[in-house]
Amino acid sequence: MRTAIRLCLILASVVALSHAQSARPTARQIIADIQKHVGLEWSSDTVDTVKAGNPDTPVTGIAVTMMATMDVLERAASKGLNLVITHEPTFYSHRDTPAGMPADDPVWAEKRAFIEAHHMVVWRFHDYWHAREPDGIEVGVVHALGWEKFESRSQRGLFTVPEISVEHLAADVAHRLNSPVVRIVGDPALKVTKLALSPGAAGFKSETRWLERADVEVLLVGETHEWETVEYVADAATEGRKKALIVIGHIPSEQAGMEECARWLKQFVTDVPLEFVPAKQPFTVVK
C-alpha cells in the first residue's frame, strides 16, 4: 500500500513538473513577443537571430546583457536564466561566424558546450534595438550620462554642454559609465561645448561625418581603428583645428543601453524572471 502511495506521489510530481515546464513560454515565443513590441517590420537580413541553443526550449529566466561573454553566461546559468539576450556577438565576429577560425577551436568549442550543457538559448538584439525610435542604446547611455537636457532637439547624438576641458569631460564620462580605460586624442586642455556621441563602433565614415561638422568639437566613441579616426583627429589637432576624440571602450559605451533594454522588456515580459547582467570591462589598466 505504501509503495503504491509513493508511486502515485512520484507520478503526480512528474506530471506537475511536466505541466509547469509546458506552461513556461519558449525562447521562440518570447522573441516573437519582443519583435511585435519593437513595432518595426522584421527582415531576414539581420544579425538579430538565435546564435546558440534550441529556440523551443522553455525559458526559466532571461538575462539581458551587452555581450554574452563566458563570464556573463556563467553568472546567468548560476541564476537559472537560460535565455540570454545579448547586444553584441557571442562568437567573435559580427555574424558570429569568425572567418578563419576552425570549428574545433578550443575556446569557441567550450563556450558552445557550456551553452548546450545548461540548456541555454542565446539571441542577439542589436539591429532593431538601434532601429527603434528612439534608439534604445542611445536612450540608456544619454540617461546614464545625465545629458538629456543638453541634446539637440533636431539632431540626436548632438549635444551643447557648459564649457569644459576635454580632460575633465573624459573623466566625468569615465566615472558615469564606469570605464577606467577612457582615452583622449587631441589636446586634453581644449575647452569645448559642442559634442557628438557615437556609442559602439560606427566606423570611420560615420565618425568623420561628425568630426567634419562645425558644431562638433569633440566626438565620443566606443571604439575605433587607430589607423583611421584616431589618426584623423591627431592630424586635425596638429593642424590647429579645434577637434578632439574621446574613446570610451565598446562595452561601457553601450552597456547602459542594454540596461535600458531590460527596463523596457519588463513592461511586457512578466511571466518569467528577467535580469540585467552587465558584461565586465575586459581591460586592466597598468598603473
Image: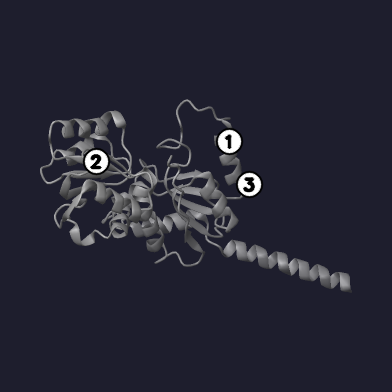
Q: Callout 3, which amino acid?
A: Ala
The residue indicated by pointer 1 is 109
Cα gap from disc 3 to disc 1, whole angstroms: 12 Å
Which numbered dot is residue 117?
3
| Secondary element type, mark 2 | strand
Taking depth in this image into account, of 242 and 64 the one nearest to the observer is 242
User: How many numbered tags mark residues here?
Assistant: 3
Does residue 222 appear to the left or right of 14 in the view shown? Answer: left
* Rendering coords of residue 96 (x, y %): 45, 37
State the image quarter where residue 237 is shown: top left
Q: Callout 1, which amino acid?
A: Ala
The residue indicated by pointer 2 is 245
Q: Earlier in the sequence, mark 1 or mark 2?
A: 1
Q: Earlier in the sequence, mark 3 or mark 1?
A: 1
| Secondary element type, mark 3 | helix
What is the residue that sits farthest to the front in this orientation? 287
